[in-house]
Structures are given as C-alpha cells and as structure tokens.
Image: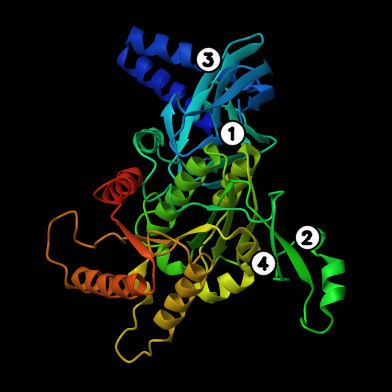
Amino acid sequence: MISPALLSWTWLSLALLVAGLFLGNIILLAGAVFLFVAVLTAGVIRPPDEVAIERSLPRIICWVGDSLVVERRLTVRGGIGTIRVIDPLPEEAAVVDGNNFRVVWKWPGELSVDLSYAITFAKRGEYTLQETIWESQAPLGTGHAQSGTVGPALNVLVAPRTADISRLNSVRAMTRSTLLLDDISHIRSSGEEFRELRPYQPGDPIKSINWKATARSGDAYDVPLVNELEPEGRKAVWIFLDTADYMNVGTAASSPMENTIEAAGTLAEYYVSQGSTLGAYAYNTQGGGELLSPDNGQKKFRRLTQMFTGLTPGPPEQDLLRSVEWCKSFLFRLRPQVFIITRLDAHYPRPGDDSEQLDRLTTAVIRLTALRARSRRGGRVRVIHVSPPSQHESVGWADPQSDMSRWETQATMAALQQAGATVMDWNPSNERFITTLVRHMDRYQ
C-alpha cells in the first residue's frame, strides 16, 4: 500500500514537471526530476528498525531536589530516516539537563548515540519512569512509520530532604542546658543496677519479671512484679506526626503535610546522630497509622525515611489520644521525650461544634507529660504547630480567614501550654524549621 506522504510528494513532483514544461523553466524541470528520483528512492527505503535502548539509573533513591541522571543509549542497526525517542515523566519531575524527547537521524550503517538527561523531583514519594517510547520514519515521510516501547520501567524512591543540623549541633556544643538536651529521657530497662520492685506495666520486657518476688507477694498484686533498673543513659525520642487531609493544603511541594515530614526528618536525623533511640507514629494516614518501632542507629533512620516517603494523607479518624493508647506499651517502657507535629487551628472547635476534639488533644498531652513527671522545664511534650499557607499571603492582602486561623491557633496553643506542653510555632513561609528550632533552644538556655 502506498502511503499518503509518498502520493503527496509524487503529485508535487508531477506538478513541478508540468509547470516547468509549460513555462520552459529549466530550474523547475530540474527540481521536478530531482524530487521524483528522491521520492522513488525513498519509497524503497525502509525506516529505521532493530531499535534497542539501554536505560539505567545511577541510584534508585534520591532526595527531593537532587539531580538524578537517566542514562539512556540508543542503538539502531537497520534502515534510514528519523527516530523520535521520548521518556514519559511523572508530573512532579522536571528536566534540568538534556531532554527526555530527542529526534535523531540515522544514515546507513549502525547508529549508537547517548541520549542521557537529568531530572529532579519536587515532592517526596515513589515514582515510576515508564518505558521509553520510540517511533521511526523513512526519509520524506514515505513508507509506514514503525514504533514501539522499550522497558523495563524504572522505579525511583524520592526521600524528603531534611534541614542541615550543623547549626543545631553548634548550639549543642555551646551549652548543655538547652530545651532539647536537658529534657531528653532515658530508656529505663537497659541498665544493670537494681533500683526497686514495681508492678508490671504494658511494654515491660518479659525477662524483667521477678517471678520469685511475685510468688512471695501472694495476692497483694494482681499483676507480676518486675525489677526496676537504673537507666544506662541512652536517650529516647518519640515523634507523633499528624497526616490528616487538612494537612494537605497548598502546593504539592510546599504544604503542611510536606513541612511536617521535613520537621520530623530533621529531628530524627539530629537525635539519631546523637545515638538516641528513636520511635515514630504517623496517625490519620490513608489506610491507618504507620508505626516505626523504637531503635537506634543509621539503619533506623533509613527505615524512618522510607516510612516518611510513603506517607499519604487520610481522613482525620484517628486522633492523638487514640494514637497514644496504641503506642502506650512503647511509651511506658521508654519514657521518651515526645514531639507532636500538627496544625493547631484544625483542632479548635468551630461554631456549632462541641469541644471534644480539643479536649481529647489536651488529654493526650496530659497523659504524655505524666509519663515523666520529673522535668525541670514543666513537661517533656513538644508540640510543633505547622502554619498553613495564607491564601493572599504572597500579594499582601488582608485575609479574614487567615486572621481567624491565627486566633484559633493561639487559643489552642494556650490550652496545650496549660496542659504542660511546650509549643513551637513554625511558619514555613517565613523561615526554615532549623531556624525555629534553634530560636527555641536559645530561648530556654
């Protein structure tokens, strides 16, 4: 079957031939003959085929904003003509070097060319680079185009970027009486020096039960007795992350949800670098909460980063109080310093609503504070409020809704401070999280 392009070029050459004969123009006649010969030649040339594309990534895990090179090499063994190569990219990916769409001309013989390019991702998550699509065409568009896909697809894990903790370490080096250092708790069950006997509590290891003392106590206790040991000094930190859908406002790259993960990652990196035992729980996620059991070391930080990368917002069906109940076995054993990252204005009761949501939030804070009643700073619970983006903030307009949100934040903040928590107010539009953290550390020196 003759292609439409071949017919079009043939009719054009005939039109030039007729015009040259009628006008007696040698140039038109020569052009008609040249075009007709080219069309006949192109009609018997097959488009490029035997296409092979090798594609790879230097790494499958990168940070938000990092440049990731997609190494792509095209090899074509047969045919003559043009080859179009394109890699479909996710919406969150942007090309920073090279091009994911290339057009290459192939002469007779084998063609091998490098078509690599570099991309960045603006948002954390798990992404898939779909198979490469190619299409070849004979010269002058004659003949039928050939196309296909070359795989396999490449998976990329984009981890949330954390802030540089060097400023935090410098503040730590200047003084030991800071907010984040003198209130850090210790694991109770890892020491060797015996302190006292006490009733068993959820989360206590079975090996700590003193069966002889339990037998001698008779019916005095309904639960076994355990050996209370002096702590060996390892610090323990627990992070609660609110990932409800009201956190997912703003742009894809900058929202309370993404800022919450940045703050949690910065805290985790700092405490892991100090040798602390770290645990975390993300509540209100899609499909239920995400628990990271307590542990220490860089391996734990990598697991935490993977957990943060896969978090997706969900309906606010699981509040902080229920999350505390879910994690109480770990909390009773560790007695950790607790960080809660959320939006405070979302917990304030709106007109016509009861105050149950705010009451449950303050109750959870009171229970967490009671885990370690001995505190020189009035409790070990740190609540980090992540301010949502203002609708008219960028143009400087007055926004009554933002004013109401700030008022609700202040009211909720006062209730939590009365319950024994320390509240950090972070506005990501004005400053980075590490700046807010250092400022609060300086305030409590």
Q: CA distance from mark 1 to mark 3?
A: 15 Å
Proximity of marks 4 and 3: CB atoms separated by less than 8 Å: no
Select label 4 or label 2 by which is in front. Answer: 2
Badge nearest the viewer, 1 or 2: 2
* Residue 173 vertical placement versus 20 (above, below): below
Labelled pair 4, 1 in contact (Cβ < 8 Å): no
Instruction: Tell me the mark number nearer the camera, choosing from 4 and 3.
Output: 4
Q: Using the image, tell me which numbered label, if any, was put on residue 38.
A: 3
Q: Residues within 10 Å of mark 1 (few under 14, many from 20)?
A: few
Element on which disc 1 rests: loop
Seen at 77% across and 70% down, the residue is 225
Mark 3–mark 2 distance (CA, rounded to whole Å): 90 Å
For marks 3 and 2, give the one nearer the viewer. Answer: 2
Position above or below: 143 against 320: above
The label shown at residue 290 is none
Where residue 345 sits: x, y (%)?
A: 32, 71
Q: Which residue is depicted at the point 51% across and 61% down?
A: 240
Q: Which residue is mark 1?
A: 3
Residue position marked by numbered label 2 in the rendering = 208
* SS at mark 3 in the image: helix
Q: Amino acid at mark 3?
A: Ala
Mark 3 nearby-residue class (10 Å; few <14, some 14–19, many ≥20): some
Q: Position of residue 268 (x, y in %)?
A: 51, 46
Amino acid type, callout 1: Ser
Mark 1 or mark 3: whose residue is earlier in sequence: 1
